[in-house]
Amino acid sequence: LTIAVRATMRVVVARAEGGLENVALEARAVPPAPGPGEVTIELAAGGCNFADLVSLKGQYQDRQEFPYVMGLEGAGIVVAAGDGVPRETVGRRVLVVSKGAFAERMNAPADRVFALPDGMDFATAAGFAIAYGTAHGALDWQGRLQKGERLLVLGAAGGVGLTAVEVGKAMGAEVIACAGGADKLAIAREHGADHLIDYRSEDIRARLRDICKGAKGGDGPDVVFDPVGGDMFEPVLRQCAWNARIVIIGFAGGSVPQIPANILLVKNVSALGFNFGSYLRNRPDLVRGSMRQLFDWWQKGALRPLVSARYDLAQAADALAELRDRRATGKVVVTTGRHAG
């Protein structure tokens, strides 16, 4: 079943390995009719992620062959459905987590598509799944965060860090937000952080001792959400509570920390990795359940996604530069102009 047909579409292409100078807008034929188990989505917006930059450098674990259409998530309307997909899927407002989302249309597996709750606009939806899915999966499945525990979020005003602040609060944690500068920390506070640490001007270990003084297990956080890595990792590790769990999300700080195993041993600390894409592939049931929980929290007002910048599809390189330069607070999205609302 198909709603409409267009001859060409705009797409954002990574032409070669390297920097943003290799990102270009191109015109391509619209995708063919969806195959079995697939849908075609006319996209309104795509969400920008740090993984887009890592992939462009040829360093992402799921390497793509150049040239390729960029973007890992988006939102829009299903306009065609392949065999095995319910006919009523056509016409639904959805978000999608699949490669090639920086485009006006894409084909995607139906199991990577999630119907939007009433009232969620496309720009919000385009940046929702990966950031919030990462935060929830990391804190629940890996971090085993419990109500009343202390959660430290590094990079707490960034696209994924800010979602971890909100998800941590929704799970009943006491949230400590760490970011660079008063403006970013103010955003973390607005989204629920209980305590603030400015890593540019404050000693992280001293502030953690002060905030967590007298806490069960020691003067430090029980769970750490770390999308930053770099120089902050070791001082945070040394100040963790006994039996703490550090969940490693990424390395926006630019370097991969080498973990001193003796500290893990002495403090009974667990260092755990989390990759949302691997759960999509290996445990789609968990991801679908997570999306239901996240949509429920959003509908109740516990999650307040921040879209800090919107760019036209033609300005995708400028949008990604906000992430590269660590200027972004919340999510950055690119829009196609295809749908409003």
Image: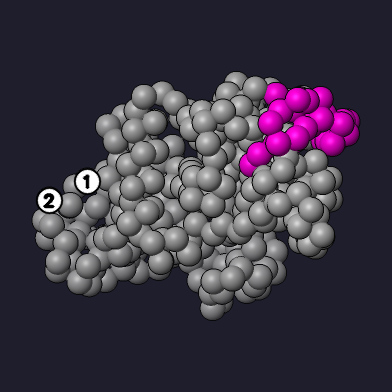
Q: Is residue 271 visible?
A: yes
Q: Is residue 4 left or right of residue 150?
A: left
User: Is 204 a magenta residue?
Assistant: yes
Q: Residue at x 84, y 36 (%)?
A: 205
Q: Are marks 1 and 2 in contact (CB under 8 Å)?
A: yes
Query: What SS does tag 1 mark?
Result: loop
Q: What number is the disc on residue 216?
A: none
Q: Is residue 264 left or right of residue 203?
A: left
Tally the marks: 2
Q: Residue at x 61, y 68 (%)?
A: 60
Q: Residue at x 82, y 46 (%)?
A: 238
Asked if residue 10 is positioned above or below residue 222 in the image, the reply reads: below
Within 10 angstroms of label 2, few (less than 14), some, or many (20 or more) residues? Answer: few
User: Is 203 a magenta residue?
Assistant: yes
Coordinates of residue 250 in the picture (x, y in percent) = 66, 55
In this view, the residue in front, 181 or 335, is 181
Residue corresponding to mark 1:
92
Quadrant in the picture for residue 185: top right
Asked if residue 121 is positioned above or below residue 19 in the image, the reply reads: above
Which range of residues does the magenta coloring cover? 195-223
